[in-house]
Image (cartoon, rainbow, N blue to C red):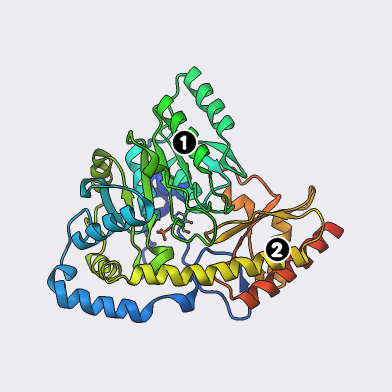
Amino acid sequence: MARATGLEVTGLLSSKAQRAGPGWFGVPRSAEGRISLLGGFPEPSSLPREEILECARLALERDGVWALEYGATRGYELLVEQLLVKLRRDQGIAATPEQVLITAGASQALGLLVDALCDPGDVVLSEEPTWMGAVRIFRAAGVEVRPVPLGAQGIELDALAAILRELAAGGRRPKLLYLIPTFQNPTGVTMPLAARRELLALAYEHQLLVIEDDAYYDLRYEGERVPPLRALDDRGHVAYLGTFSKIMAAGMRLGWIVADPALVAAVAGLKPEGGTSPFAGAVAAQFCATGMLLEHVAELRVIYRERRDAMLRALSETMPEGVTWTRPEGGFFIWLTLPPGASAARVAERAAAAGVDVMPGSACSFFSSGDSALRLCYSFATTEQIGEGIARLAEAIREELAA
Ligand SMILES: Cc1ncc(COP(=O)(O)O)c(C=O)c1O
């Protein structure tokens, strides 16, 4: 008997799933023999395995049942408590529990916020280039993104003001502005304090909700701390996103939102699983409460500073004339701009053929535009690999310039 043919499920997909496209099932490990300057992954040997093991033991001994039960929607209680302490101490952000929601990483936080705020066709503003996860989230939401260029001081405020005026004149109100003001992904740029104040003034004038993604705030290697927008905002215009991915372990899949309680409640309503992994939350709470987080962040700053310096040194030793790059004070990324006429996509292909993976800048753009830049990540490769990888990349650029 002939087997019945299966159900054709692709025809059943929602317009959101169709816009998003299928998920990626690859395994995020660098292949043997390759040098990865690609993904913003924490340095593998720095991951605090022993400490997490100890924290898991403590969590289960001290509150075992509740770490293993379904948890409160806001997140594991002790983690919320510890997060409030951390935000006040490190970020200068005063928050109450009602303003907090623990999420499965900052990725979920942004995805849920966009779901809670946006319908297809709504206008949203975002700096560009930006984090490619945000590009995917806005694409899936079907919103109309108005990209705002980014300069050496972060988002260009004149351009932002012009777009806001133009939208207001057309009777359109943007739902939100998304930006990464500190150690931006992909450029590494940080907005100075004065620019932050100006941005908030614009947000107040135009009744604009700002989503501040602060995934890298704790990883500063030099220079003065600049307060997050959320710490400067006294009118509730900033929804603040953060993550334990870069400062504890990405595998914990824990992040957070700090926002107006009504927005937090709306986002929580879109979380079918309820509270994000109480077990991971209980472990993370111990990691914070025992002081391990502060110690670990101090170690990471040393590791990443060395790698950033290795990359900057290799760039200045090997890059041909006309290539420029940013000099980040923290975070994971350097943005490299090629001379006019060179194609970043082709350079990335040539580099890949030479065993070095880098991200073409178009992946960080809403309309896949901008073929003149590459994102280089120094968090994952060792200093030796960084030196070798940049030398091979410089060769790939030379070949592209000669072609
Ligand atoms: C700017 C930015 N936001 C959010 C994320 C996602 O973080 P999480 O691992 O918490 O989902 C990343 C990770 O690469 C990032 O660079």
**Rendering coords of residue 101 (x, y %):** 27, 51
Give the camera-side residue of 232 and 370: 232
Q: Which residue is mark 2?
A: 349
Q: Is residue 329 visible?
A: yes
User: Which quadrant of the frame does ligand 1 lie within?
Assistant: bottom left
Hey, what amino acid is under mark 1? Arg
Instruction: Find numbered disc 1 in the image and state the secondary structure of the residue it sits on.
Output: helix
**Rendering coords of residue 75 (x, y %):** 23, 57
Mark 2 or mark 1: name the one nearer the start of the chain.
1
**Rendering coords of residue 78 (x, y %):** 20, 62
Give the camera-side residue of 256 and 310: 310
**Rendering coords of residue 177 (x, y %):** 45, 37
Using a 10 Å C-alpha cutoff, classify the residue at mark 2 as few (fewer than 14 neighbours), some (14 to 19) or many (20 or more).
some
Give the camera-side residue of 399 and 66: 66
**Residue at left 76%, top 67%?**
317
Image-based side of 57 in relation to 129, left or right: left
Q: Is residue 250 visible?
A: no
Image-based side of 340 in relation to 365, left or right: right
Image-based side of 307 in relation to 238, left or right: right
Q: Which residue is mark 1?
A: 197
Q: Nearer the viewer, mark 2 or mark 1?
A: 1
